[in-house]
């Protein structure tokens, strides 16, 4: 019988996404999620691990080692009328939209659709709760994931985090919760992990109403936040509020606290830092939109939407039930929703094409060098190999600098004037 390793294989080969699914997947509670070098990583207590006797549930549910995106999408989305796009994956319809509540729309990333829909679904009693992530001034790493069961809990979690997020307790908390319909909000890798875990646990699968995925260009380590605070002399222990994106479309980084009143345009500090704090596994991901999410949410970076100073979302819908929810919310005046062609969706998400091309090429380059890489059921080819090779070397240099604090002085030089902060 072929030996299947435990999750230590993923960590040892730098394939971990930090999603945390493996912790709850382990029936012997041998896994704990800890922070190592700015990222969430599972640690296995080998004295408790039952891998030698045939248990490999942690590995079976791990998105880091790869996922069959096309095959799993066919299983997850059997509705008639499904379409396919090489960047978006399987889908029913694409939309732009926003919350019609100004407070939610203005203070959430883009148009506030995730927060608004979760609040509406709770109030309509269509769901019993949602597993979300918020800023937490009392947490040492400033992020906290939890099961929200009230509108107030949902709204605390609004806006983008731009730091590692682990949903390590989502499975256990949802399984022990009294309700029967829960939504999990996560990045593509989170959703991939939960979809893989569903195949192992019928009880969990039956309690999931939907997965809401957030488009992801790539993750960032906690070193990003540490570097940003360090460069701006922000003491995290004195923060009472922090958001990378607040106050309108794209928004501002907002930091408030004792002696702290800092606001800065999101693009001014974020874009120059590029790939310095991107984990290796994120450079090997080909799923931008969250192809296994029932509904996926993000920005739309083209005119006329980019000119909207309050915020507009784009959405990919793959589940008929979720499409009905959105249609009803629109009819009740809760949201604004307009259908758009998938070509316009892709035009507004350049990173979708980038990940299918550049990251697929990075997988091939790493494989040629003998490094372990994730396995997908297809590996696209977009663009010219020479261009991606230059990007591979450039990204590797940036990542080396960002992952070694003693090298942070070089960020100014490497990125020039644009990265002086």
Image (spheres, helix red, strand yellow):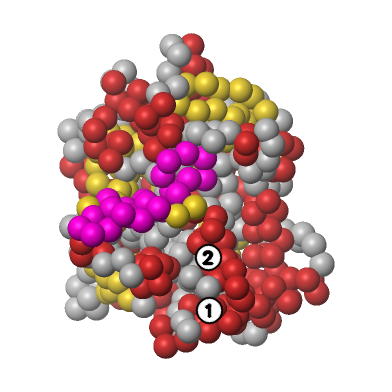
Name the residue rendered at 54%, 28% in the picture.
Answer: 97
Residue 33 in view in this figure: no
| Residue 157 pos. (x, y %) | 32, 43
Q: Does label 1 or label 2 sit earlier along the sequence?
A: 2
Name the residue rendered at 58%, 82% in the picture.
Answer: 413
Q: Which residues are magenta?
A: 241-263
Magenta segment main secondary structure: strand
Please check the rendered image and state whether residue 260 is part of the magenta-colored stretch, yes or no: yes
Residue extending farthest top: 331
Determine which residue is flagged by label 2.
Answer: 282
| Residue 403 pos. (x, y %) | 45, 79
Looking at the rendered image, the disc whose residue lies closer to the viewer, 1 or 2, is: 1
Relative vertical location of residue 355 with respect to residue 159 in this rendering, above or below? below
Please check the rendered image and state whether residue 315 is part of the magenta-colored stretch, yes or no: no
**Relative depth, front residue between 236 and 167:** 236
Neighbor class of circle 1 (other Cα within 10 Å; few <14, some 14-19, many 20+) is many
In the figure, residue 303 lies in which quadrant?
A: top right
Determine which residue is flagged by label 1.
Answer: 411
Relative vertical location of residue 43 with respect to residue 149 in this rendering, above or below? below
Name the residue rendered at 50%, 33% in the picture.
Answer: 310
Q: In terms of secondary structure, where does tag 2 sit?
A: helix
Name the residue rendered at 35%, 23% in the picture.
Answer: 120
**Quadrant that contains the N terminus:** bottom left
**Relative depth, front residue between 235 and 129:** 235
In the figure, residue 152 lies in which quadrant?
A: top left
């Amino acid at each position: 019988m072929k030996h299947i390793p435990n999750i230590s294989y993923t960590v040892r080969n730098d394939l971990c996404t930090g999603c945390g699914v493996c912790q709850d997947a382990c029936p012997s509670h041998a896994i704990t999620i800890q922070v190592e070098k700015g990222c969430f990583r599972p640690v296995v207590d080998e004295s408790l691990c039952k891998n030698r006797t045939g248990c490999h549930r942690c590995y079976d549910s791990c998105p880091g080692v790869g996922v069959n995106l096309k095959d799993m999408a066919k299983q997850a989305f059997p509705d008639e009328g499904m379409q396919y796009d090489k960047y978006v994956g399987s889908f029913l319809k694409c939309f732009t939209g926003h919350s019609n509540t100004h407070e939610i729309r203005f203070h959430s990333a883009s148009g506030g659709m995730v927060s608004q829909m979760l609040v509406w679904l709770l109030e309509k009693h269509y769901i019993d709760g949602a597993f979300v992530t918020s800023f937490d001034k009392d947490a040492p790493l400033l992020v906290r994931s939890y099961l929200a069961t009230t509108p107030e809990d949902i709204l605390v979690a609004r806006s983008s985090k731009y730091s590692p997020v682990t949903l390590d307790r989502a499975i256990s908390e949802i399984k022990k919760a009294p309700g029967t319909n829960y939504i999990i909000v996560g990045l593509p890798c989170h959703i991939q992990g939960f979809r893989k875990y569903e195949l192992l646990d019928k009880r969990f699968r039956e309690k999931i109403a939907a997965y809401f995925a957030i488009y992801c260009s790539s993750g960032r380590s906690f070193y990003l936040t540490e570097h940003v605070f360090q460069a701006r002399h922000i003491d995290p222990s004195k923060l009472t509020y922090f958001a990378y994106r607040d106050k309108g479309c794209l928004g501002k980084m907002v930091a408030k606290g004792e002696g702290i009143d800092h606001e800065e345009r999101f693009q001014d500090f974020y874009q120059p830092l590029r790939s310095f704090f991107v984990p290796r596994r994120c450079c090997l991901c080909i799923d931008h939109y969250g192809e296994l999410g029932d509904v996926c949410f993000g920005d739309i970076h083209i005119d006329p939407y980019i000119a909207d100073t309050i915020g507009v979302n784009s959405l990919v819908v793959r589940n008929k039930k979720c499409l009905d929810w959105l249609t009803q919310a629109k009819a009740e005046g809760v949201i604004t929703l307009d259908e758009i062609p998938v070509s316009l969706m892709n035009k507004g998400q350049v990173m979708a094409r980038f990940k299918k091309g550049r990251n697929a090429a990075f997988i091939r380059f790493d494989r040629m060098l003998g490094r372990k890489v994730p396995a997908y059921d297809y590996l696209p080819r977009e663009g010219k190999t020479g261009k991606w090779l230059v990007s591979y070397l450039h990204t590797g240099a940036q990542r080396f600098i960002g992952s070694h604090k003693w090298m942070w002085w070089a960020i100014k030089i490497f990125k020039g004037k644009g990265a002086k902060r």
